[in-house]
Amino acid sequence: MNFNFPLLRPIRVLLFPFSIVYKLIITIRNWMYDKHIIQSTSFNMPVICVGNLVVGGTGKSPMVELLITMLKNNFKVAILSRGYKRKTRGYALATNLSTALDIGDEPMQFHSKFPDVAVAVGEERIVAIPQLLHDRPDTNVIILDDAFQHRSVNAGLNILLTDYNNLFTRDWYLPTGDLRDEKRSYKRAEMIVVTKCPEELSQDEKSEIINEIKPTEGQQVFFSSIRYGMPYHMVTKSTRAINNHTEVLLVTGIADPRPLKKYLQEKSKTYYQQSYNDHHIFLIDDLREIIKRFNAISHKNKIIITTEKDAVRLEKFHNELTGLPIYVLPIEPEFLFGEKQHFADLIVTFITNFNNQS
């Protein structure tokens, strides 16, 4: 059993009986779907689901962005997300007036980076999809963000992500572990991507992980690492490199900042961290504390680094941030073993075959 939060381990172990109850509930729920007691709905359109089996970050947002980049020049792509921690409810289509409070930080990130792609949110995806198609009738591919465990919609292609540092095979169920779905649910995916791998992952370890996952016949397993881009200023969009003469204040509220911290440890002179909970909604007091912490760093060559997901929640302080050296660090998945093209070909083949059969 693998625990990601050592300080919480005693508490989480004490909650083990609740995890047994939780496992029983999701087992019954999946059985009802498998036996068609609860129905899943299919749509006459290519629907791609990106998800995982756990709570916390496995790299879903970068994977969704990669899919958008791969497909947007040849297909009319739409993204549908739940819009976690937004202050609204129901269906909403992102517009130029939308904020992270309206649609959630991740959908806002998608909309900001890909303004020509339809981005919508809705808790009930089975209801939201027809509304999305009504608003954007030219859509011919829908990507469901974080929907693998929500079986009301039957996606034609499921991409399941699992973190190299916390493989679903080694995890346990909530609240003792991080699993929110049965381990055996991995069999419903057509593709599995092991994310956040070390760049130097060996062929032997790759084979060991594949053997541990035990993919079903025809199930494809890929491996990816994190590639960081050039930091860009939140307001001016100018870029600035991080080097061993730079001191960094890391401001972040994401589920798993460990890869980011490792990157800064390797690239910067030193870094300090101002941490918040995942999807934290920044207040003006938070901004004041960030500025105070930054000003306390005596080194002249200093910057603030935040993530793209945090940046959309800080955007409301646009005017206050103009004079601050606050930079956003973009990331994207980097497929290992030269398999990016194979991954892309499988996605396009699915869409093409679906359209030819319709």
Image (tube, rainbow, N blue to C red):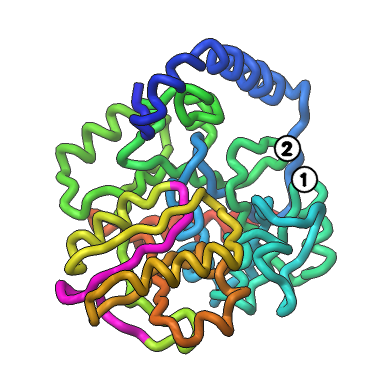
Give whichever of 50, 260 is nearer the camera. 260
Location of mark 1 (residue): 124
- Which-is-in-front pick, marks 1 and 2? 1
- Residue depicted at x 40% and y 76%: 327
Give whichever of 308, 339 is nearer the camera. 308
For the question of whether residue 160 can be seen, the reply is: yes
Residue 319, image x, y percentages: 58, 84
Residue type at numbered disc 1: Glu
Quadrant housing the N terminus: top left
Disc with the residue nearer the chain's start (1 vs 2): 1
Residue 278, image x, y percentages: 52, 50
- Residue depicted at x 32% and y 57%: 260
Give whichever of 259, 24 is nearer the camera. 259
Element under disc 1: loop
Mark 2: few/some/many CA within 10 Å (<14, 14-19, 20+): some
Residue 264, image x, y percentages: 25, 62
Give whichever of 104, 225 is nearer the camera. 104
Give the residues in magenta: 239-255
Location of mark 2 (residue): 152
254 left or right, relative to 132: left
For the question of whether residue 356 can be seen, the reply is: no
Element under disc 2: loop
